[in-house]
Image: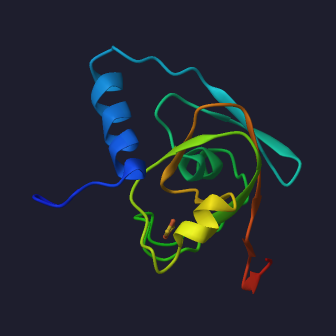
């Protein structure tokens, strides 16, 4: 978050979660995320992308910073806390429609997601 910038609700919830969880005030359990019918376990405070990489979950990886959109997924079910994402790769309309950047999203429930890219194809 830039100094002096007004944070949006998505950024605020992500930073509050990190702040409280590192102080032990907020505990998150591990969640199951199903990606293309494969179930992976996501640790406390872990993004879907990091968990996917640990377990070969099949999400395309790019910048890991919310700027390229390579890791975009469609949430079929479940909820996330989200970090910073460039509006050029994840618009507010897409966010409202259930799209997330896996590198910026931490599950807060069990989830089912579908990647938007497979190798060099855009699936959605
Ligand atoms: S890997 Fe680039 S936005 Fe997620």
Q: Is residue 52 left or right of residue 91?
A: right
Residue lying furthest right: 37
**Picture residue at 55% right of the left edge, 30% below the top:** 43
In this view, the residue in front, 15 or 59, is 15
Q: Residue at x 33, y 44 (%)?
A: 12
Q: Residue at x 73, y 70 (%)?
A: 116
Q: How is the image coloured?
A: rainbow
Q: Is residue 3 visible?
A: yes
- Viewport quadrant of the C terminus: bottom right
When asked about the image quadrant of residue 32, the answer is: top right
Task: From the top left corner, tell me how far across and down residue 97 is, in percent.
Answer: 69, 62
- Residue 31: percent from left, percent from top: 66, 29
Query: Considering only vertical position in the picture, is 21 above or below 7?
Result: above
Instruction: Answer above or below: position of 32 versus 120.
Output: above
* Left or right of residue 87: residue 75: right
- Asked whether residue 71 appears in the rendered view, the answer is no
Which residue lies most toward the left here? 4
Q: Answer with left or right where residue 83 lies relative to residue 117.
A: left
Above or below, 110 against 66 in this view is above
- Tell me where residue 17 appears, x and y as whole percent: 38, 32
Q: What residue appears at the point 72 percent right and 39 percent down from the top-left corner?
A: 78
Quarter of the figure with the N terminus: bottom left
For the image shown, how many numbered marks are present on the structure? 0
């Amino acid at each position: 978050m830039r100094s002096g910038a007004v944070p949006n609700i998505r950024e605020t919830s992500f930073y509050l979660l990190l702040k409280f969880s590192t102080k032990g005030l907020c505990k998150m359990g591990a969640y199951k995320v199903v990606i293309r019918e494969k179930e992976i376990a996501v640790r406390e405070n872990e993004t879907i992308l990091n968990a996917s990489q640990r377990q070969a979950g099949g999400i395309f990886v790019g910048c890991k910073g919310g700027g390229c959109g390579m890791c975009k997924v469609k949430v079929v079910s479940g909820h996330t806390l989200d970090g910073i994402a460039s509006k050029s790769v994840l618009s507010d309309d897409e966010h409202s429609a259930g799209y997330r950047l896996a590198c910026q999203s931490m599950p807060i429930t069990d989830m089912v997601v579908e990647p938007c890219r497979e190798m060099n194809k855009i699936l959605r």
